[in-house]
Amino acid sequence: MTTESPVEEPAGLRADARRNRDRVLKAAMQHFELHGISASLEEIARQAGVGAGTLYRHFPSREALLAAALSDRKSALLAVSRQAREIEDADTALERWLEALQDYLRSFNGLPAPVLAALKQEASPLSLSCETLVSITGEFLERSQTHGSARASITANDLFMCAIGMAWVLNRAEACGTSTKALNSIFASGYLEKTGKTAHDG
């Protein structure tokens, strides 16, 4: 089972530095939710009541700040993975994981882009998270390939890439005249051996 430690604040921070870091992180989460990942870092620092230098001292890049802002959501996603492992039907377990993964990738508007970039950039603060999520996807996929209906030709990276693409599309589903349910049904059918069969069909 793959696990990943949550993003922790650096050890040895003074109380005032810890408060500044917490204020920046809180402001960042609010701005990312309202404006997406392209939210102004200057505005985040201003709302937190600190200078830009303080923000960058705690979070050297936008990706580092984003990784920290996603920490709680990532922990919740990993909790779902543990719950999904208890599902007896392999196809249903895989579908449950993919739904949760897509929800995570939709945490902030525009998130799929840096996640996709992190797959090729080992130095990215999001890289370790991506490796973990691809690995977990592989666990569920392999189980579905062995005991369910997933095609043997599908790889964990393939499916993770599809989830990234679906997350981007799902954020725009209603505006494009469709629904997340309809698109997820098509997504589910795509990785099953029998065309048109979803995990819920049994």
Image: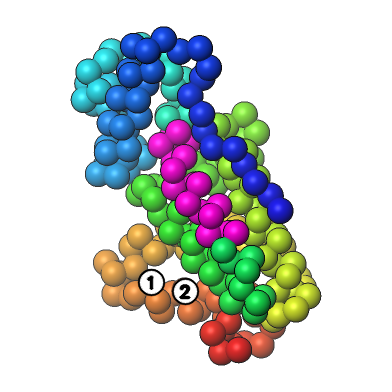
Mark 2 crowd level (few <14, some 14–19, many ≥20, 10 Å Cα): some
The amino acid type found where label 2 is placed reads Asn
Distance CA(mark 2)–CA(mark 1): 6 Å
The amino acid type found where label 1 is placed reads Thr
Q: Nearer the viewer, residue 63 or 129?
A: 129
Please report the residue visible at 35 percent of the width from the left and 49 percent of the height from the top: 109
Whether residue 36 is situated above or below residue 28 in the rendered picture: below
Q: Which mark is residue 31?
A: none
Mark 1 crowd level (few <14, some 14–19, many ≥20, 10 Å Cα): some
Q: Position of residue 83 (x, y in %)?
A: 57, 63
- Helix, strand or loop at label 1? It is helix
* Residue 10 visible in the current orientation: yes
Membership of 105 in magenta stretch: no
Residue indicated by mark 1: 180
* Residue 94 visible in the current orientation: no
Please report the residue visible at 37 percent of the width from the left and 21 percent of the height from the top: 21
Q: Nearer the viewer, residue 49 or 197?
A: 49
Q: Where, quadrant-wise, is the C terminus in this rendering?
A: bottom right
Discs 2, 1 touching: Cβ within 8 Å: yes
Q: Position of residue 80 (x, y in %)?
A: 53, 59
Q: Position of residue 77 (x, y in %)?
A: 51, 54
Total marks shown come to 2
Whether residue 73 is situated above or below residue 186 in the rendered picture: above
Q: Which mark is residue 184?
A: 2
On the picture, is 132 further left or further right than 104?
Answer: right
Membership of 73 in magenta stretch: yes
- Helix, strand or loop at label 2? It is helix
Magenta extent: 66-82
On the picture, is 25 further left or further right than 67?
Answer: left
